[in-house]
Amino acid sequence: MIDSKLETEKDTAGVDVEIYYCPKIGNTPCAPFFLSNLVSMMEQGHVINHMVGNNRCRAIYAKALSKIVGQITFDTLDDYSKTTWIHSAAVLKDYRQRGIYKMMHRQLEYLMPQLGSRKVAAHVHITNGVGMAGVQRVGLEPAYIRVEKTI
């Protein structure tokens, strides 16, 4: 499977950003970025076992100046609305606050009907202010609250 270029747009710094769709992460240009982001999240204590090895993970990724600078990994569930679950999203530190996540997310939503999906969702921890602000900027809102108790 070959990654397909979806669009080229300038970020807020005036740099051309190319957005690609990766139908299978495996042996593609976005795999090293995905793996380094996965390792980083695991080092921070996040558990990502729901996407490792399911062989359905796809990605939207951004390239600027010939290098991958951001990625949204996702899976489409077989539930009633074919929910597109965002498993992880990352933009390199030097490229944040430049509209790149918004560009990738817009292309994800454009692609969703072609994948048969009608809903997008993500898990964002309640203490993750940056993550919550990011998903709310693209229109996601809390749908339910999970409550728990550690004993």
Image: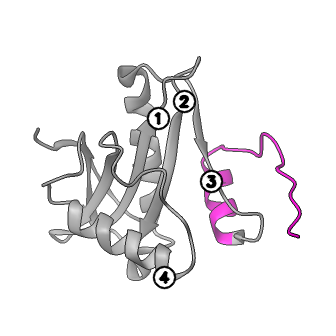
Distance from disc 3 to disc 1, alpha carbons, whole Å, reads 13 Å
In the displayed structure, 107 sits above or below 45; it is above
Q: Earlier in the sequence, mark 3 or mark 1?
A: 1
Residue under circle 1? 109
Answer few, some or many: residues within 10 Å of disc 3's Cα (few below 14, many 20 plus, some between 14 and 19).
some
Dominant SS in magenta: loop
Q: Position of residue 60 (x, y in %)?
A: 33, 48
Disc 2 target residue: 83
Tag of residue 81: none
> From mark 1 to mark 2, how far is it between C-alphas?
11 Å
Whether the residues at callouts 3 and 2 have beta carbons within 8 Å, the answer is no
- Quarter holding the N terminus is top left
What residue is at 37 percent from the left and 24 percent from the top?
Answer: 115
Instruction: Examine the rendered structure and indicate whether residue 40 appears above or below residue 77.
Output: below
Q: Quadrant of the C terminus?
A: bottom right
Q: Quadrant of residue 74?
A: top left
Q: Position of residue 146 (x, y in %)?
A: 82, 50
| Residue at the image point whose x is 60% and y is 41% from the top | 121
Q: Amino acid at mark 1?
A: Glu
Give the mark toward the camera: 1 or 2.
2
Q: Earlier in the sequence, mark 2 or mark 4?
A: 4
Q: Secondary structure at mark 2?
A: loop
Q: Which mark is residue 135?
A: 3
